[in-house]
């Protein structure tokens, strides 16, 4: 069998009574930038910790290049981990922080003297453009520079796999943007495998070659960013991926009619065949472009109220309440909608996506 | 709805350096204005002078035409929300909310009624018996907002109110703040260092740097007509492309010759230049202001090679090694671009931003 680079084979992991993974299997390709996305508590950080060897697996195994990792110690895995909070040694200089992993007993043979260590430190600090900071203590440098130092320390051992746990969370917007370009550049330059854990779908879409979406210890979808954006196969993926996010709500389908709020949408009979069981319950995903709003009453429209709004880019994003549901709709920045104003909503049905309520999976589109 | 005027306001803590230097700002009634700038720019000092928490070194602040320099903080009828919430830890939510009303010597029954009303508005009715340390960050901030609202002041001052919250809560609460501002018919002064947050909820933004007001304007004007390079760089979700070069006048148009390259940009827009050194200029072009072309369509069409691509919602940000140097272009995802692809692009000079060596924008016709 032609196996992928990293294989998680039927792994299970439990913390006391909390089951994180139950029989999870996952294959990961070599030399790709992989993002693992999910809300907190979905198991994404645990997955990295299992791979790094910081946690034990209860059952199953992890293989890299066909080699079972279960019996291989943390230090022999050739995997580096950069943490959210940098975890630098505050009393050491940037140089000593970078050099630290090379001074371990197991690397004594490879880096026997100061010169051999200095050579590696210089190479990595040049790559990350922190070569001017080598003499500084890490508490004397900025957050972005600490980030780079932490990354440099992870890369200095020339790992095959780099694990990043929320690497951009503590950076401000501008720095987040430049750092993610940097991360992608380094991954490509060194041709290593990166597993980057984040709760931020926008960050994942921006950097990843491939995204794995987790929910409660299970993979709900994995694909390229573009495929996830245009062909989500689960309503949760539809809900979290994309900008602005979709609003997901339950809808009634009878014969060839769909009811969304008070609006009835008819669809063609040819589409009807793809809906096997109409008596089932469905979710519909409403994206900004599916929502048409008007200040005057239209036939077959639903009534909503402007709850609030915000400006994003050069557009205005309205928060609309229809009963207890919230819809988001982007409109021209110059439209002067007032809070609490009544508005009338109809729907643009092209590419409207529906999901089965029973399992959340994609059902059909009209 | 009150209006607020800062007239020639200067604040110096040590008598030597000015934290705020000659600030003139006219805040209109019912406006939500944000004072935006990096740390140390004087934004908090300005707000604290308005609140009466700092003395005014020079100048006058007036509310509805009345100078308030010598009015005590408690008599200014201003409600303030702080970054760290500043709740009383030993009091439950209901008692925290009651404080401003007890200070006003209201009857117990009336206080209880107002507390319940405001708790309902901010959806914290279930939390009234809890102490602040039993609440999540988002709930605590709602309590802080509620305590601000309960004073029934018509002026809200908010000093980085979302600074300590998790990302998703910041997004959620900024539309809540906009809603409260409008439904309470208040005049609000909001402080942040986060340009995206400022853009999302403000009617106008006052950009400060090193104690000086740089520009006060709507988001669109700050983006299109920045007064100087600082504003151009500080505002905008993606970094503006800055291209150095010199300008030659030719017939009806100008030619901008890009430094260290043979590239020339022809600028037909009407620009007024006087007494300026034309050899030391910088053109600012936002990533949004480029069109990607299939081939050379006009004199300003240039070529570049793709270094990186990021998906941003349904658009993509392309990093290019181009005839203008390293630039970023935001494009619709009309086709799938790949790294190392060569593409043509044309910059738009509809809102030409041309900065002199002091950083002033020369293309402002005011």
Image (spheres, coloured by chain):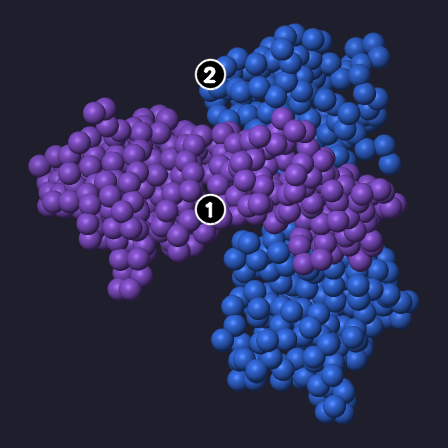
Chain colours: A purple, B blue
Q: Which picture quadrant has residue B303?
A: top right
SS type, badge 1: loop
Q: Nearer the viewer, residue A181 or A272?
A: A272
Q: Furthest-right residue in view? A: B65
For mark 2, name the chain: B
Name the residue at 69% across, 73% down.
B120
| Residue A311 coordinates in the image, percent (x, y) | 71, 46
Query: x, y percentage for residue A189?
Result: 35, 25
In the figure, is residue A115 to the left or right of A233? left
What secondary structure is found at the residue carrying circle 2?
loop
Q: Quadrant of residue B44?
A: bottom right
Q: Return the residue nearer the eye: B17 or B360.
A: B360
Q: Which mark is residue B340?
A: 2
Instruction: Provide the chain ID for the residue under circle 1.
Output: A
Which disc number belongs to residue A359?
1
Instruction: Residue B18 in the image: state x and y as whole percent.
Output: 67, 59
Q: Is residue A46 above or below residue A27?
A: below
User: Percent position (x, y) of residue A204?
Assistant: 47, 38
Res A128 visible: no
Q: Residue at x 64, y 47 (%)?
A: A252
Q: What residue is rendered at 57% in x and 45% in y?
A: A279
The residue positioned 79% from the left and 51% from the top of the image is A303
Q: Vertically, is A44 above or below B339? A: below
């Amino acid at each position: 069998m032609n196996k992928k680079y990293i294989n998680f084979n039927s792994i299970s992991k439990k913390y006391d009574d909390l089951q994180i993974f139950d029989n999870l299997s996952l294959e990961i390709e070599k030399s790709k930038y992989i993002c693992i996305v999910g809300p907190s508590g979905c198991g994404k950080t645990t997955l990295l910790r299992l791979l790094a060897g910081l946690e034990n697996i209860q059952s199953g195994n992890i293989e890299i290049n066909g080699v079972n990792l279960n019996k291989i110690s943390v230090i022999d895995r050739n995997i580096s981990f950069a943490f959210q909070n940098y975890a630098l040694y505050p009393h050491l200089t940037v140089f000593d922080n970078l050099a630290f992993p090379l001074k371990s007993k197991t690397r004594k043979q490879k880096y026997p003297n100061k010169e051999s260590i200095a050579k590696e430190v210089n190479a990595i600090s040049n790559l990350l453009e922190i070569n001017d900071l080598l003499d500084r203590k890490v508490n004397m440098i900025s957050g972005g520079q600490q980030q780079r130092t932490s990354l440099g320390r992870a890369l200095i051992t020339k790992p095959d796999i780099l694990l990043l746990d929320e690497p951009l969370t503590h950076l401000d917007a501008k720095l987040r943007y430049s750092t993610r370009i940097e991360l992608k550049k380094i991954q490509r330059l060194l041709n290593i495998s990166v597993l980057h854990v984040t709760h931020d779908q926008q960050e994942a879409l921006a950097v990843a070659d491939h995204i794995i979406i987790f929910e409660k210890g299970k993979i709900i979808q994995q694909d390229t960013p573009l495929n996830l954006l245009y062909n989500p196969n689960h309503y949760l993926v539809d809900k979290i991926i994309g900008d602005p996010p979709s609003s997901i709500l339950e809808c009634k389908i009878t014969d060839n009619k769909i009811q969304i709020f008070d609006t009835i949408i008819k669809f063609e009979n040819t589409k009807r065949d793809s809906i096997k069981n109409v008596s089932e319950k469905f979710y519909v995903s409403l994206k900004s472009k599916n929502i048409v709003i008007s200040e005057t009453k239209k036939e077959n429209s639903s009534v909503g109220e402007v709850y609030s709004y915000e400006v994003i880019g050069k557009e205005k994003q309205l928060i609309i309440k229809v009963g207890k549901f919230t819809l988001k709709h982007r409109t021209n920045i110059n439209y002067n909608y007032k809070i609490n104003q009544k508005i009338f909503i109809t729907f643009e049905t092209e590419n409207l996506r529906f999901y089965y309520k029973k399992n959340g999976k994609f059902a059909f589109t009209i | 709805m009150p209006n607020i005027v800062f007239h020639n306001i200067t604040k110096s803590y040590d008598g030597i350096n000015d934290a705020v230097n000659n600030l003139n700002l006219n805040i209109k009634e019912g406006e939500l204005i944000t004072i935006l700038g990096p740390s140390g720019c004087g934004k908090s000092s300005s707000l604290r002078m308005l609140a009466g928490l700092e003395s005014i070194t020079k100048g006058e602040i007036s509310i509805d035409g009345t100078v308030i320099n010598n009015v005590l903080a408690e008599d200014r009828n201003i409600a303030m929300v702080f970054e760290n919430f500043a709740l009383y830890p030993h009091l439950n939510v209901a008692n925290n909310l009651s404080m401003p009303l007890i200070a006003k010597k209201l009857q117990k029954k009336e206080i209880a009624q107002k507390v319940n009303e405001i708790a309902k508005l901010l959806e914290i009715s279930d939390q009234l018996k809890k102490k602040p340390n039993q609440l999540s960050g988002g709930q605590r901030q709602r309590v802080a907002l509620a305590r601000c609202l309960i004073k029934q002041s018509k002026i809200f001052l908010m000093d980085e109110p979302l600074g300590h919250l998790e990302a998703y809560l910041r997004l959620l609460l900024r539309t809540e703040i906009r809603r409260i501002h409008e439904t309470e018919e208040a005049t609000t002064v909001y402080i942040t260092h986060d340009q995206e947050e400022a853009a999302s909820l403000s009617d106008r933004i006052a950009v400060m740097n090193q104690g000086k007001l740089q520009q006060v304007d709507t988001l669109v004007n700050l983006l299109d007509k920045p007064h100087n390079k600082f504003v151009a760089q500080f505002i905008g979700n993606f970094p503006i492309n800055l291209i150095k070069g010199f300008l030659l006048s030719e017939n009806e148009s100008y030619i901008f010759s890009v430094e260290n390259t043979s590239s020339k940009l022809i600028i037909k827009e009407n620009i007024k230049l006087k007494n300026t050194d034309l050899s030391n200029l910088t053109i600012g072009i936002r990533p949004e202001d480029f069109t990607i072309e299939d081939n050379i369509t006009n004199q300003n069409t240039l070529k570049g090679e793709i270094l990186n691509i990021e998906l941003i919602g349904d658009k993509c940000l392309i990093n290019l090694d181009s005839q203008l140097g390293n630039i970023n272009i935001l494009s619709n995802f009309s086709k799938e671009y790949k790294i190392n692809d060569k593409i043509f692009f044309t910059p738009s000079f509809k809102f030409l931003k041309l900065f002199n060596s002091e950083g002033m924008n020369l293309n402002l016709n005011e």
